[in-house]
Image (spheres, helix red, strand yellow):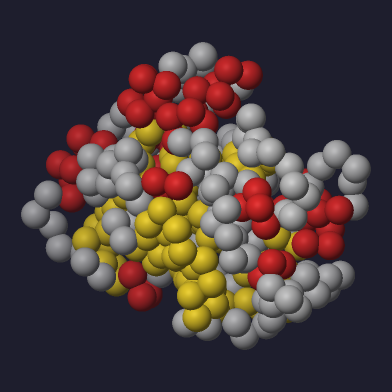
Amino acid sequence: MKLCTYLVDGKNQYGVVIGDGVVELSEPLGSEFADLRSLIAADALAKARVVAAGRKPDRRLSELTLLSPIPAPEKIWCIGVNYRDRNAEYKDNSDLPKYPSLFVRNPSSIVGSGQPIEKPRVSEQLDYEGELVIVIGKEGRHISRENAWSHIFGMTLCNEGSVRDWLHHGKFNVTQGKNFDRSGSIGPWIVTADECDPKGPHDIITRVNGEVRQQDSTERLMFTFDYLISYLSTFATLKPGDMIATGTPTGAGARFTPPRWLKPGDVVEVESTRIGILRNAVAEEK
């Protein structure tokens, strides 16, 4: 199933994507599950299937304002330098990392597919990073690698927008440059693990104004999905709805000479064959 969250009359609602439309789940299931996160936490996907079975879409996708599928996750984990060529991009002659690089994002830094991402007033260095995202479905701590797959509810996509000059403001962190309001996006929906096997392989492509800038496969990850879940759950309890952005391939704008920063009017698309396309235009911060 494809599950999305969207805005109607100022309220967040959720539903099942069927073709170019959405079967609404919020009304029939709202008394039990207020949002998609609570549906996932209750392991109630079967109830969603019953509601959606045989129904025609209630709304067209083109009429909706899509939000991040989980608008308020407890945690958005982000993995840095995870595709094999990425370490070489830094040109520092360092060995391949023993452990993953890790940072977190705030929900306010994320918009949904179709909404504009914002270039901040204080920087000209907004960059794109196309990534695959795994969505946690079952709570766990100290999860073994062999059990990790059962904790994945599904997958979605991320443009992990980064403000490059602000990444270097701190000596030990990149938090500032990764958390500008509305600088990144997640979506367009979650594809459940029964239809999009997280074990893959999965392709990932990023385009800017139709030009392919990034292209790779999960077959080339240094830290695989099961490893990431096991590693993260060693120190933190993973909760339903938590998201893990699993790293970006080579080809971000910062790696060109000269750098190719995003400008207002640019359109960024992140695509994976079995998930779909996350599409956002770039706008100037108001």
Q: Residue 91 is drawn in which quadrant?
A: bottom right
Q: Position of residue 128 (x, y in %)?
A: 62, 66
Q: Residue 60 is drawn in which quadrant?
A: bottom left
1 sits to left or right of 95: left
Q: Where is residue 190 in the image (x, y as percent from the top left)?
A: 37, 50
Out of 205 and 77, give the one closest to the viewer: 205
In percent of the image, x 33 and y 47: which residue is there? Answer: 201
In percent of the image, x 90 and y 43: which residue is there? Answer: 171
Q: Is residue 184 visible?
A: no
Count of numbered marks: 0
Q: Position of residue 113 (x, y in %)?
A: 48, 66
Q: Is residue 276 visible?
A: yes
In percent of the image, x 44 and y 16: which residue is there? Answer: 144
With respect to residue 198, does 53 lie above or below? below
In percent of the image, x 78 and y 62: which residue is there? Answer: 164
Q: Residue 116 is drawn in which quadrant?
A: bottom right
With respect to residue 211, does 201 lie above or below? above
Out of 239 and 214, give the one closest to the viewer: 214
Q: Where is residue 233 in the image (x, y as percent from the top left)?
A: 55, 21
With respect to residue 230, does 245 lie above or below? below
Q: Quadrant of the C terminus?
A: bottom right
183 sits to left or right of 24: right
**Residue situated furthest left in the rendering:** 54
